[in-house]
Image (cartoon, grey):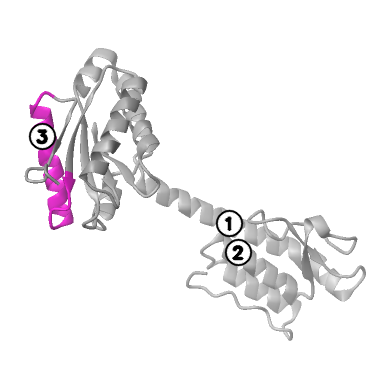
Amino acid sequence: MGNSTAQRPGPRQSPDEVVGSTTRQLLHAETAAEVRELVLQAVHGLGGSTVAATHAGDDALPVDVSLGTREPLLPVAPAHSVERLRLERHLPALLADARQALDTLARVERLAADAASDPLTRLGNRATFQRVLARLTPTDVVVAFDLDGFKTVNDTFGHQAGDETLRAFASCLRGVIRSRDHALRLGGDEFAVLLTDTDLAGARSFLDRLRARWSGQRPTPTGFSAGVAAWAGTASATHQQADTALYAAKAAGGDTHRVADGQQGR
């Protein structure tokens, strides 16, 4: 779990102490698993136990204390017992607090995702690129992209067509990268991909797959240029060399790629 540690309610705690302790810890829960664990500990602290819903008998209460995070679990206590009365009295409020904690966690996760994503393409944004670039290693490759004639697309077909083109290119990037790679939109029609644990041959293969996919899916007659750079001593130098190679590809007429100077033989 995170910085807050779920403490199992002691056997001498009163029901009110169990509920109060659990409620306070729910305010600081950092994961859905932590919320679930706090609720399960509270059930035990109130004198009950839990059973999988598929194996529940008549002594189980019809409420899922796993909160949908795993297979349904039902709280159990003998009918008419003190423990049963405690669960029936205190669990509804505890579960409401737990659901509120889960909702809060989900909102925080959405906000974090939005802050790290480009709203149009849902790729990582420039800020995310800087964070990922800082973790670049000597076994990684940076590829810088620019769509050819993108301004003409906007001027000829309209900005809606331009947006559709950007989204389509982002979709193609997502379709050909591996799960450990990173695809990002830096702004306008500039994109970048960080290929992890690969070499220039792997980068060329990636570009071949991307170009084949793009030629079949592009919504407007737009090509792309790319600059490729393997490790150049530092992350920033590697990115700079990829950008320089991109300019060379554009100067060569576009719709092609160039490898950074001095790296072609790798």
Picture residue at 30% right of the left edge, 44% below the top? 125
Residue 212 shown left or right of residue 26 in the figure:
left
Picture residue at 73% right of the left edge, 76% below the top? 45
Q: Can residue 29 be seen in this view?
A: yes
Question: Is-magenta flag for residue 216?
Answer: no
The residue labelled by disc 2 is: 35
Question: Is-magenta flag for residue 233?
Answer: yes
Asked whether 125 or 200 is in front, the reply is 200
Q: Distance between the residues labelled 1 and 3?
A: 48 Å
- What secondary structure is found at the residue carrying circle 2? helix
Picture residue at 43% right of the left edge, 49% below the top? 111
What residue type is disc 3 on? Answer: Tyr
Look at the image and give the residue range highlighted in magenta.
Answer: 229-253
Q: Distance between the residues labelled 3 and 2?
A: 51 Å
Above or below: residue 244 compared with residue 84: above
Callouts 1 and 2 close, C-beta under 8 Å: yes
The residue labelled by disc 3 is: 247
Asked whether 49 or 135 is in front, the reply is 135
Q: How crowded is mark 3: few (under 14 residues within 10 Å), some or many (20 or more)?
A: many
The image quadrant of residue 97 is bottom right
What residue type is disc 2 on? Answer: Val
